[in-house]
Image (tube, rainbow, N blue to C red):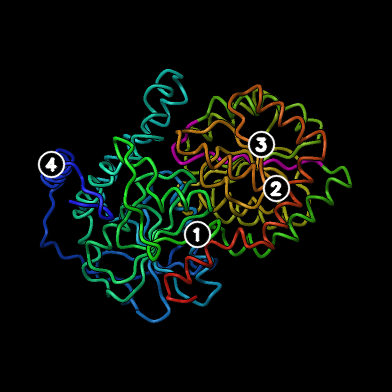
Amino acid sequence: MKIFGNPIEPSDERKALGKQRSFAKKFGYDPAANYPVRVVPNPVLNKILGIENIVIGNAGRELSVKKTLIIGTIRMGYGHYRPAMAIASAAKHMGITPYWLDLLSYEDTPGAKIIRHLEKLYNMGSRWSQKSSLFNKYVWEPITAEGFKKLSFNASDIKMCELMSPVYGNIPREIPVIGTHTWPALAALHAGMKKVVYMIPDNWPLALHLAEGAVHAVQTPSVYMGYRTLKNMDKKRKTLNPIPANQIRMVGHNIDHELVSNIEKDCAERIRRMDKNKPRRVLISIGGAGAQGDFIRSLIEFMAPRIREGSLILYLNAGDHGKVFDALKDTLLKNNIEPREYRDWDATFAFAGRALKRDAPGAHLFVNSDIFSAVYATNLLMRSSDLLITKPSELAFYPVPKLLIPRVGGHEAWGAIRSSEVGDGTIECENLELTLQALRLLLDERDLLDMYCRQIVAQKKAGTYNGAYNVVRLAMGKK
C-alpha cells in the first residue's frame, strides 16, 4: 500500500485492514447493498442557500447532472457543516444547485454507524480536554496535533471509507463532489466519482486530511506548503514524496457569499457604532461538541455588569445543545439578567434581520434542535456583531473581528496564528486571565476593533475570503 508513492509499513497496513474487517462485522457491511437516492428541498436552508438534501428512498426528484454539485459532509461537531454551507452559498450565487450528502444522516448504513461511533469518542475527548489539563496535555493535544498527522492514520481511513462508499452507488458519476471531511471525499473516490475536490479545514497539515485522487483545496499559503511536502507525516520524520501539483490548490478562506458580499457595509457599521459610542455587540458561539462551558460562564459573569448597564449587547448561540442552553440561561439569571430566548428558526431569522437595523439591548439566547438552524444561526448573527468570541476552529477564518479563546485540540492552534497574522482576530488567549485582558481592550478601547475592521476590508480586496467561490470553480472545471 502506498500514499502518494510513499510506502506504508506492512504492520500499519495490516492494522488498517484489521480495523476495516472489525467495523464491517460490527456494523453489518454488505458490499452488494443498494441505496436508491432522490433529492428533496432542505426544510431550513433551501430558500437561503438553495440546498437540496440527497435522501435514500424513492420520494423526491431524480438527481440532475446539469449545473449541480454534491457537498459531501458529516455532522461531527460544526466544523464540517459550516464550510459546507459556505460552499452551498457560493454555488447558489453562481447559479449551481448544491446537493447535500451527509454520510451520518443515513442512519441504517454501516457508514453512519461507524461515524456515530467515532463521533462519540471525539466529542468525549473534546470535553475531557477542557476538564482535565493533564488529559489535554498528555493525551488530547498529542493525538490531535501529532497522532492525526501520520500517514499510517490516513491508511486506516482509506480502508475504513470503503465501507462508506455504497451510498454513492446510484449517484451519476459525472456530478462533481466537494468533500468537507476526509471520509465523504474518500468514499466518493472509492465509489468511482469522476471529480472530487476536498476542502481541507484548519491550518495545520494532518495526514488525516488526505484523499489521494482528489484535488486538495487548502485555505492558506503556509498549510499549502505543509501538505505539498507532506511535512513530518512519516513516523520516522523522513522526507516524503510530495503531493503532485495538480492535486492541491490554495483557494483562500471558505466563507459564505452573504458574508463576503457585505464585508464593507458591515465593517462600516461597526466603526459607525464605535464613533457614536453605541453598545458593543458580542457574539459567543458554542462549538459542536459543547465543550468550554465553564470558560464561557466565566466570560458571562465578567460581562454581566456591562449588560445590565446597557454598554454591551450579548448574543449567545448554544447551537443544538439544550443542556448548554439551560446552563447559560441559569448563569445569566444568577447575574440578574433575564435573557430573551429564541428556540425556533423563524424567531432567530427575524431577530438577525432586525439587528442589522437597530440595537436590541440585553442578552439574547439561541438554541435549536435542528442542526442546520443551530449552525447557521451564528452566520446570521455574525453580520450585526462587533465581536465574535470563539475557539480557533473553522470560525477563525471568518471575516468578523474575533477574540480567540483556548483551543480544543492541538490542530486548532494554527487557526489563531492565521487570524492574528491576517489581522482579523486576536492571538490565541490561552487562559482566562489573558482572555479577560483582551476582552477589556476590545470593549473599552477602539484601536484593536478598528484595526480588525480595516484589515477585514483590506483582506477582502486581496481575495483572502474567496475560498468558497474558488472551490466551486475547481469542482465545475472552471479557471
Looking at the image, do the residues carrying marks 1 and 4 touch, with CB atoms under 8 Å apart?
no
In this view, 333 is above or below 190: above
Viewer-nearest of discs 1 and 2: 1
Q: Residue furthest front?
A: 239
Residue corresponding to mark 2: 385
Give me the disc on residue 14. 4
Mark sitting earlier along the chain (4/2): 4
Task: Measure the alpha-carbon separation of dots 4 and 2.
Answer: 51 Å
Mark sitting earlier along the chain (1/4): 4
Frontmost residue, 338 versus 117: 117
How packed is label 2: few (under 14 Cα within 10 Å), some, or many (20 or more)? many
Viewer-nearest of discs 4 and 3: 4
Amino acid type at circle 1 is: Met
Across and down, in percent, residue 166 comes to 20, 61
Determine the secondary structure under disc 4: helix
Task: Measure the alpha-carbon separation of dots 3 and 1.
Answer: 43 Å
Across and down, in percent, residue 309 comes to 81, 31
For the record, the magenta segment spans 279-291
Residue 283 sits inside the magenta stretch: yes
Q: Is residue 53 visible?
A: no
Task: Measure the alpha-carbon separation of dots 2 and 3.
Answer: 17 Å
Residue corresponding to mark 3: 339
